[in-house]
Image: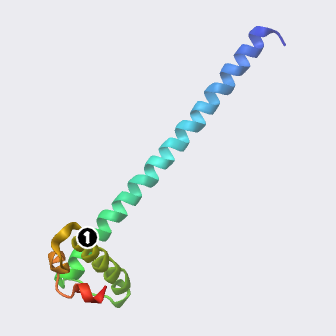
Amino acid sequence: MGIVDRVKQNLTDTVEMAKDGLGEVKEIRDKREVTHLYGDFGKKAFELLESGAIAHPELEPEAKLIRRTLAERDYIKGTGSSAAAGAPGDPTRDDI
């Protein structure tokens, strides 16, 4: 195999690797988009749960964790209480 043939083969291999890499990038981008959509959906579901528009016992463990996290974050930010989370049923500082 001459040098020209090796260069051609290297270029072909490089192009194939680039195509594979682009496919992986697209797959990662698609997964990130789905994750973002799930996050938006979950946020909306939590808002609906808090407003009373929806209710289901299987949602409560996650909702409780979200409430607790929001209350802790608001307390750490200096509000001094979890009341800033604002939703009925939010845990108080003593619940945390």
Side (left or right) of 21 relative to 71: right
35 w.r.t. 19: above or below = below
Secondary structure beneath label 1: helix
Residue at the spot of label 1: 76
Coloring scheme used: rainbow
Q: Is residue 91 visible?
A: no
66 w.r.t. 19: above or below = below
Q: Position of residue 96 (x, y in %)?
A: 31, 85
Q: Position of residue 94 (x, y in %)?
A: 26, 89
11 w.r.t. 65: above or below = above
Query: Looking at the image, which residue is at 34% across and 64% down?
Result: 39
Query: Looking at the image, which residue is at 68% across and 26% down?
Result: 13
Q: Is residue 20 visible?
A: yes
Q: Position of residue 32 (x, y in %)?
A: 42, 53
Q: Quadrant of residue 47?
A: bottom left
- Viewer-closest of 51 and 80: 80
